[in-house]
Image (spheres, helix red, strand yellow):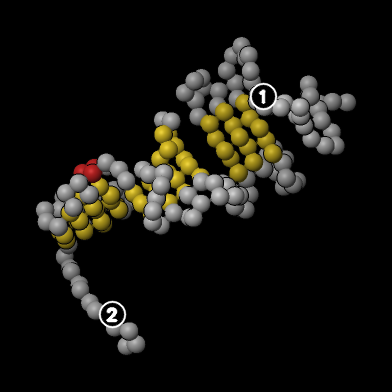
Amino acid sequence: APGAKLDVSGGGIWTSGHSTNEATIELGVARTGSGYSYLDLHGDTTHTDYGLRLLRGSGGANTDSMLAHRGTGALEIKADDAGSVHLGTDNTRRLSIISGGNVGIGTTTPANTLVVNGTGVGGGFRVTNQSNSYEAFFVNSTLGMVGIGTASPRQRLTVVGDEIMISEVLEGR
């Protein structure tokens, strides 16, 4: 006996004959109240609830959505062919990985391994400790200045700290 309004046993759900029309599967359409909608995928018997879940929360128009992965294996987001992968917010692409492997933050066409474009604090790029209390490295791209140990470089290179060591690395020694 079926355990739900639609219970498919021994195969899958197929849609066909749509020509150029959209083919969709929609969950939670025409609800009379808020509630979770989720799609659970099971690939083995390890977890009885889900192995991979696509979830839409129940908090109204501004609720969270989530892709949840169970287990110790990798969660891969990939383009199998020459396509790019993009992550975005506010309907804008923020991070791009193009087919050659270059990564862009603030650009969708990175020409190098890592390209960061943006107008962050001081129009720059920063590396801090976990609590953001120490500027390990800061680049003010607007003024062309670099700070080590400071977010306020006053010259092309400003180093703030107790010790500065400059050494030469010689091959074969």
Find residue 3 and report its horizontal and vertical position in percent.
81, 26
Q: Quadrant of the N terminus?
A: top right
- For the image shown, how many numbered marks are present on the structure? 2
Can residue 47 be seen by looking at this rendering?
Answer: yes
User: What residue is at 71 percent from the left and 27 percent from the top?
Assistant: 19
Q: Is residue 134 left or right of residue 130?
A: left
Instruction: Find residue 26 and report its image quarter.
Output: top right
Residue tagged 1: 21
Q: Residue furthest front?
A: 20
Q: Describe residue 152's horizontal placement relative to residue 126 as left or right.
A: left
- Measuring from the top left, give residue 58's x and y in whole percent: 55, 23
Which amino acid type is marked by label 2? Val
Check the image and report above or below for 163 versus 50: below
In the image, what residue type sits under mark 1?
A: Asn
Please say if 171 is above or below 2.
below
Indicate which label's residue lies in the foreground, 1 or 2. 1
Q: Which numbered dot is residue 169?
A: 2
Q: Is residue 78 visible?
A: no
* Viewer-closest of 170 and 64: 170
Of helix, strand and loop, which one carries label 2? loop
Name which quarter of the figure residue 14 lies in.
top right
Image coords of residue 36 (percent x, y):
60, 25
Identify the residue at image location x=43%, y=30%.
91
